[in-house]
Amino acid sequence: MRRGLTAIDAAMLLVIVILIVQMWLLTATLESYLAGHTGVALPAALISSVLSTACVALYLFIRKVDRDVRK
């Protein structure tokens, strides 16, 4: 049971780190875009999509581990 809770804690920490990186990416991209560098918008959107997909995958992992721990 304790191993499952440790895995959930680690996955939640990764989600938090990914979300912080996404906020930083949004801020940097918006600042560059407003400065006239329009070429950064598409790569940033793609990277943000990858990070969002990672968060969804970690969420599904947390649900699976939680379901296994509760059995």
Image: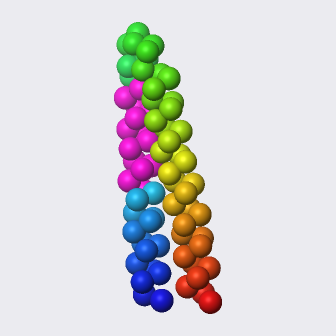
Region rendered in magenta: 16-29
Residue at 43% across, 87% down: 2
Residue 30 in sight from this viewpoint: no
Residue 60 drawn at (x, y percent) = 59, 63
**Dominant secondary structure of the magenta stretch?**
helix
Residue at 45% across, 57% down: 15
Q: Is residue 1 above or below residue 7?
A: below
Q: Is residue 40 above or below residue 8?
A: above
* Quarter of the rendering containing residue 59: bottom right
- Residue 23 falls within the magenta-colored stretch: yes
Looking at the rendered image, the quarter that the C terminus falls into is bottom right
Residue 44 drawn at (x, y percent) = 45, 29
* Tally of numbered discs: 0
Residue 17 in sight from this viewpoint: yes
Residue 70 drawn at (x, y percent) = 60, 87
13 displayed left or right of 52: left
Q: Is residue 26 above or below residue 30?
A: below
Q: Is residue 26 above or below residue 70?
A: above
Residue 13 drawn at (x, y percent) = 40, 63
- Residue 13 falls within the magenta-colored stretch: no
Residue at 40% across, 47% down: 20
